[in-house]
Amino acid sequence: MRTPEEEKQAVIEWLEHPSELGKKPYAIEFTKQFTTDDGIECLIFKYKKSIMSPWLLAIASESGIFSEQNKYDPSTEVEDAVKLVEFLKQFWKNKAAEAGEKEERAKEAGRFVGFVLLENSDWTCHGFEKQFKEDWGIELSDNESKDDITKVYMVPEAGPKTMLAVSLVPAPVPKGEADFFAQFNFMWKDAVEVTKTHKAHLIVTVFGADDPKEGGVLYVKAIASLCRDANTLGAYYNDVVFEPKFMFAMADMIKAGQFPLMGLVWFGLGRSVNGVSAYTCGLRKLGKDEIEILDANEQPSELHNFIMCVAGYVVDQDVILHDGETIGFSNEQRLKIVKSEGVNVKGDSLKILY
């Protein structure tokens, strides 16, 4: 390793990065050098953000430089430094495995299935094909299907193997499922009342896209075009029912060159005795883990905006978050991530300890 003075300069440069302290520390001192049980050399530093701030802990090791901006305690400095080294070791293991992890996730992602709710079964594929071409300039053709009940279209514009299937079912969604989940759309006050009137539905599926995001965009395009039919009442997927005009807004986003995240991921909110919770439903189809924030002492609108920002960051930057890591949108914000069984979503989810 370099000398303590050389490492101190490296720590200062690391802290100056915008995603860390964002500036040169007011003061920094080398305190101790030690070797971990598995042979990693580590130097401990304490630093101050400002003249009035407490001393904070940082390390420079063979695994890298790191600080969680936690208070420096001379009585536990080695123990605390070892925890930072272990965090770095796990971080690099995750990075090394990330390419394979993304590949495995992609195999399970990219399949989008939902239901378009109809006032009655008066629907034709020709009307949809005409509307889709008008909206997106793409001509859909299906030379295999013999009737208008189920149509399967190849859509190479979204990838060479991408397919879109639309199937008419002349009956409501079974077991009152859509009626039940309509209650969770806090953005549409008439969702339940309108949903209960549907007498038929379309099953809409997109699959085969090499890139889940491309498949997702095609899915939103199809749902939005189907919602322009006067017979359409709403769209049910991601455990919620969406209003047609919401899908039109998603279509406008696509036309403006933006990714329609809210059209592919539902950001749910709920109150509990201990606060407000937020969750995502749909990230798994994009190759990411669902995210939850539980029992936060925060305004619902603030929590909703925060979880949307996290999901947007994860999808836009193609990031995989892992158990034990931290996330934040400021130099001071360090929120721990825990992966465990979902509370508001099926399967495991990432809990951000807000």
Image: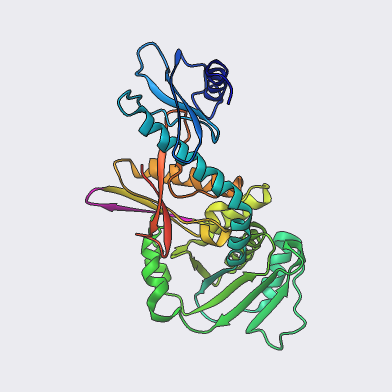
Coloration mode:
rainbow
The relative height of residue 195 versus residue 172 in the rendered view (above or below) is above
For image coordinates 50% across by 60% down, the residue present is: 282
The relative height of residue 192 versus residue 309 in the rendered view (above or below) is below
141 on left or right of 50: right
Residue 334 visible here: no
Locate residue 180, reporting x and y percent: 36, 70
Q: Residue furthest bottom?
A: 146
Tally of marks: 0
Q: Residue furthest left?
A: 273
Locate residue 287, reporting x and y percent: 57, 58
* Rendered-image quadrant of the C terminus: top left
**Type of secondary structure dominating the magenta stretch:** strand
The relative height of residue 93 versus residue 60 in the rendered view (above or below) is below
Query: Residue 159 is drawn in which quadrant?
Result: bottom right
Q: Residue furthest top?
A: 51
For image coordinates 55% across by 72% down, the residue present is: 231
Locate residue 328, reporting x and y percent: 46, 37
180 on left or right of 43: left
Viewer-proximal residue among 85 and 109: 85
The relative height of residue 299 versus residue 9 in the rendered view (above or below) is below
158 on left or right of 278: right
Locate residue 96, reporting x and y percent: 60, 49
Viewer-proximal residue among 61 and 174: 61
Residue 269 among those drawn in magenta:
yes
For image coordinates 29% across by 41% down, the residue present is: 297
Viewer-proximal residue among 332 and 72: 72
The residue segment tinted magenta is 266-274
* Rendered-image quadrant of the N terminus: top right
Residue 209 visible here: yes
Viewer-proximal residue among 1 and 172: 1
